[in-house]
Image (cartoon, coloured by chain):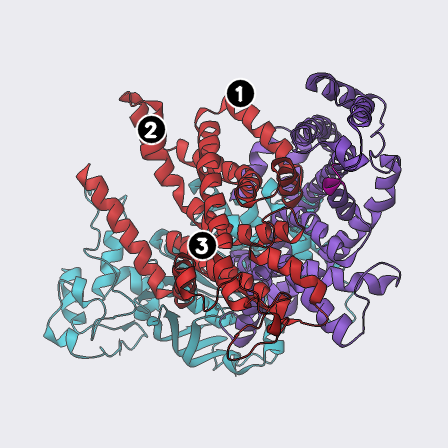
Amino acid sequence: MSEVNRNVPYLSIKDLVVEYMSDGQVVHAVNGVSLKLDRGTTLGLVGETGAGKTTIAKSILRILPDVGAKITGGKVELDGKDLLQLPEREMQQIRGNEISMIFQDPMTALNPVQRVGDQIAEVVALHLEPGSKTNPMERAKEMLEIVGIPGERYYDYPHQFSGGMKQRVVIAIALACNPNLLLADEPTTALDVTIQAQVLDLIGDLRKQFNTAMLLITHDMGVVAQVCDTVAIIYAGSIVEYGTKEQIFDHPSHPYTIGLFGAIPDMNEDEIWLHPIEGLPPDPTNLPKGCPFSPRCKYATEECRQGVVPVSETPDGHQCRCCHMEEVRKEREA
Amino acid sequence: MGKYILKRLLWMIPIVLGVSILVFTMMTFCPGDPAQIILGATATEADLAAKREELGLTQPFLIRLGNYLSQVFLRGDLGQSWSSKVNIMSQIMDRLPRTLILSLVTLAISFGLGIPLGIMAATHQNRWQDSVSMVFALLGVAIPNFWLALMLILFFAVNLGWLPAMGIDNGLASYILPALSGCMGTLATCARQTRSSMLDVIRADYITTARSKGVHEKDVIWKHALKNALIPIITMLGSAFGRLLGGMIIIETIFAIPGMGNLIIGAVNNRDYPVVQGGTIFLAIAFSICMLLVDLLYAAVDPRIKAQYASSKKVRVKKEANANG
Amino acid sequence: MAEVKAKKKSEVVRVLRQLSKNKLAVLGGIIFFIEVIVAILAPVIAPYDHTAMDLMNINAGPSAAHWFGCDDLGRDIFSRIIIGSRYSITIGICAIAIATVIGCAIGAVAGYYGGWVDNIIMRILDVIQAIPGMLLMIVAAAMLGPGFLNTIMAMSIGTIPGMARMLRAQMLKERGNEYIEAETSINCSTFRIILSHLLPNCMSPIIVQATMGVGQTITLAAGLSFLGLGVQPPAPEWGAMLSNARAFMRTAPHLVIFPGLAIAVTVLALNLLGDGLRDALDPKLKN
């Protein structure tokens, strides 16, 4: 590993643009996203289904589908080196070792015809340091124990596991090589509520042990509150608000963020109704001009539809992409 | 697992019994008088009557059927050929290996080339490799194997003189053209099936997982994707083998290979019913055993199917659901 | 009822529109359509009488007068192939039509009733399908004797089990749907339920299978004739022509080339059309 440079964040994404081709139409999945993540911290990437969250994570690892998907612009810098420029062979060394990923659906994330233990051992064997005495099989059993599965289940197949246990195996695969960065794509969405907390705790414990940074993708503000240090709210492929957890939760400035809060029940207040956001996300093949949220936004004016809305940043680093930020904030504080 | 295999083997007994009854019945209703064909046009009416008596043709159908079945299943005797008087079992034992070897070699070539071709098409989807292999696959399915056999003979045996046109006197070389002409259809079907199931599989989440682990692209395809893509390909293997065995009948006739096909066609033309019956029974047994092997291959590839076999309940239902889904 | 009809019509329109986007399928459809027209008008189109022997032109190669050359009796091969298309295409279409009707009836009964009816039918199919298809057709052809109609029958016998099995599987899938329960509960007759509701919903794979099946049957029937068990010479059936031409392969290779090409082109056209139909009928299957 290279020297830790205090001035350069561990992971820095700059102006990432990703497009898909689908039936001859261009799908604008990610439109100029910039993010920063320091070692050991957690960034929450929050947004609706289809907002481009998973695409961002897959772009970091460069595992977007070969056919159709293309990173058309931007940089993904890890410790200052641009991952998008690395040759495939070096990238393979980084995947699973330096950066690893947990997937949304544990039911389909494991190879059904391979023993679960072998699936963990494979990633260990791939990234063995030359001369290392680690036995991949032993390490796989150890990882199973760490995630709370008896080591002798190494020889079982995925169909013999429950959903929660499968996700534990996926986590074991992701953490087997002590990665410095974990990309967790809705790791608890497909699980029962009772299992969700266990899995989150497990990820948290293991990260503390290894000082792993995490990019957590979720649409669940509750999970964000529990786990994250900084939060990026993403809408239709661009970041609409970005700040520390406190900034976002205490002073939300973008109408969409506020809408997201309205869509979760607040246990402290006697609210009878949830306030869902009206309307649907825009068609990514045909994004509205200007602010993509404007068609659903009650503050929207002509100004919003004119052109790309610039990002404004407060002195303490709270970013927001909205023409009516002040107005929204005032109304919110009132 | 052992119990499952035993059950399947036992199940073959009623199947073979059914096949025997079916073929015997069909042969009985063939037009033409076997006695006339055996004795020739000059035979007297008395000779013909004696011959019919000798062949047992004068008895009622059900008695003949009963006699035949007890002869085959209780005494394990297929009888002797009407025309050559040779014991049918020994004839079959002489010829069956040639047909089986030829079929298996053909099958091996078909899958050995078809699967890589399909993988190449899938991994280069919509590029020239894909188009070339799919054009090849389309032609392979469309070209009749007996015509291809004639064309290959014309080119390699007649024009170039590289390979023998018929017979089995030249060792391995004798089998090259028959195998090539027999494999094309299966190879093409296999390539197409591989391509489509591979395209399904490489979009699966676990393939993304494998990539995210840093697995080399080659291993992603050959280690992770292929084993999963094999399952629908194995489904195809069984029916492909059946078609291949059937196709071998024509191929053997064209290349004058003394195998089962040649035996059966000759017997059909001579109205030598016991030989047709015995040959069909043996080909049905060979086919059934191959289907069993295919099902075992399933289990070897897919642990979920293996678990079903082991629990042995409702295997049939689930398998059919699997084959259709 | 009108609504149902309108819905069905729009479905047909959707499938046809989808199909028309697939260039290869359209090509296959056009080729097969032309072949059918040629078969119907064969005596008008054929440049020569297909039985007329020209002793000056025995085994003559392709020329301006005889595009595909002449055979061992000096008959024009081009004319014979055109007349022959009547045999091959009729055998293919009729055999598949018969097999589809009978196979679907068997499969529908098995799939709808289930239980012991299904069990008996399936075990009988197991027995029939234990015999490799071509062999079954050969035995059937031997039983029926050679000839045009008997070849059609033999081909159908070999194709019925596969059709029946396929419809049954499809039926089992459909039978679980709630609308069938609804029909049963309002006392629709069994026959009516099968005919007007279950069958139409099971048709997609059958249509595809039948289209491909016509091609396969043409090949198999030609194979049967090639073995001398199907259509008999001097009828210019393509397989019978090949069988006859074998003897002259060394001296007059064009005798074997053209009938085979005719089979290959026909089967290719039908496969292209079948592929296109499959994609159009079931968008999920498309890659």
Whole-percent x, y for residue C155 in the image: 56, 43
The kind of secondary structure element at disc 1 is: helix
The kind of secondary structure element at disc 3 is: helix
Are discs 1 and 2 located on one and the same chain? yes
Q: Which mark is residue C193?
A: 2
Asked if marks 3 and 2 touch (Cβ < 8 Å), the reply is: no
Q: Which residues are magenta?
A: B267-271
- Identify the residue under disc 3: C285
| B58, B211: nearer the viewer | B58
Chain C's colour is: red
Separation (CA) of disc 3 from disc 1: 33 Å
| A70, B250: nearer the viewer | B250
Tell me which label, 3 or 1, sits earlier in the chain: 1
Where, quadrant-wise, is the N terminus of chain A in this rendering? bottom right
Disc 2: CA contacts within 10 A as few (<14), some (14-19) or many (>=20)? some
Q: Is residue B270 above or below residue B153?
A: above
Q: Is residue A6 left or right of residue B94?
A: left
Chain B's colour is: purple
Q: Amino acid at mark 1?
A: Trp
Whole-percent x, y for residue B216 in the image: 64, 69
Tell me which label, 1 or 2, sits earlier in the chain: 1
